[in-house]
Image (cartoon, helix red, strand yellow):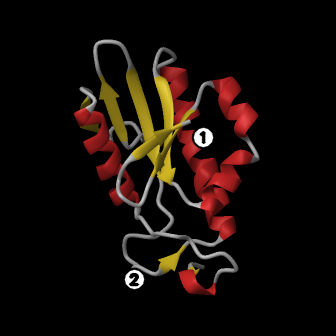
Amino acid sequence: MPVQNDQLIQADPFVLSKSEVLNAVKMYLNREGYETRNLGDLCGIDLAAANEYHTLLIEAQGNHAEHHEKETVFTGSQLDTHLSCQLVKLLKNYEKNPAKTLVMANPDTPRLRKTAEYIRQALDDLGVVRFWVKADGSIEWE
């Protein structure tokens, strides 16, 4: 069950829903010269982006559910589950599109960074790029 952000031992410094993460990623990629396309129900991946050099398959997650009030966030175990689901969706699509770059997009919060850090080497070995969305909507690549 989601919890109030202020009830966490270390509260998230900001809260973003999945759609807010996706919007920030789309705006960033469009500014960088990528054409974006929402895929959603079409193939199970949230977003595809392409320029003349790269094609990205992007799966996003937030730290807050769309239908909850803004200060309600996912618990640590929910974040673990969401990160796992992101990775599985990307890997399933990789089987169909091995030339594509896989991207996980998440809010840049300490809890999510810590969760991803546990599998950092595996993500690096698999070539999975991480987009960390900042509170101001800017993106950091990892």
In this rendered view, identify the residue nearer to me: 10 or 123: 10
**Element class at badge 1:** helix
Residue 124's mark?
none
Q: What is the crowding at mark 1: few (fewer than 14 residues within 10 Å), some, or many (at least 20)? A: few
For residue 58, what is the image quadrant?
top left
Residue placed under numbered mark 2 in the picture: 69
The residue to which callout 1 is attached is: 88
Q: Amino acid at mark 2?
A: Glu
15 over 95 or under it: above or below: below
SS of the residue under disc 2: loop
What residue sits 60% from the left and 76% below the top? 11
Label 1 close to label 2 by CB (< 8 Å):
no
Relative image position of residue 106 (x, y in whole percent): 50, 52
Quarter of the C terminus within the rendering: top right
Residue 43 visible from this viewpoint: yes
- 39 to the left or right of 4: left
Q: Residues within 10 Å of mark 2 (few under 14, many from 20)?
A: few
Q: Left or right of 28: which side holds 78?
A: right
Q: CA distance from mark 1 to mark 2?
A: 28 Å
Mark nearer the viewer, 1 or 2: 2
Q: Is 86 rendered above or below residue 30? A: below
Sequence-first disc among 1 and 2? 2
Which residue appears at 65% of the width and 25% of the height? 126
Decide: is 125 above or below 72. above
Q: Residue at x 38, y 43 (%)?
A: 46
Residue at 35% x, 54% y: name it.
137
Question: How many labels were placed on the picture?
Answer: 2
Question: In the image, residue 13 lies at what x, y percent?
Answer: 52, 70
Amino acid type at mark 1 = Val
Q: Position of residue 96 (x, y in %)?
A: 48, 21
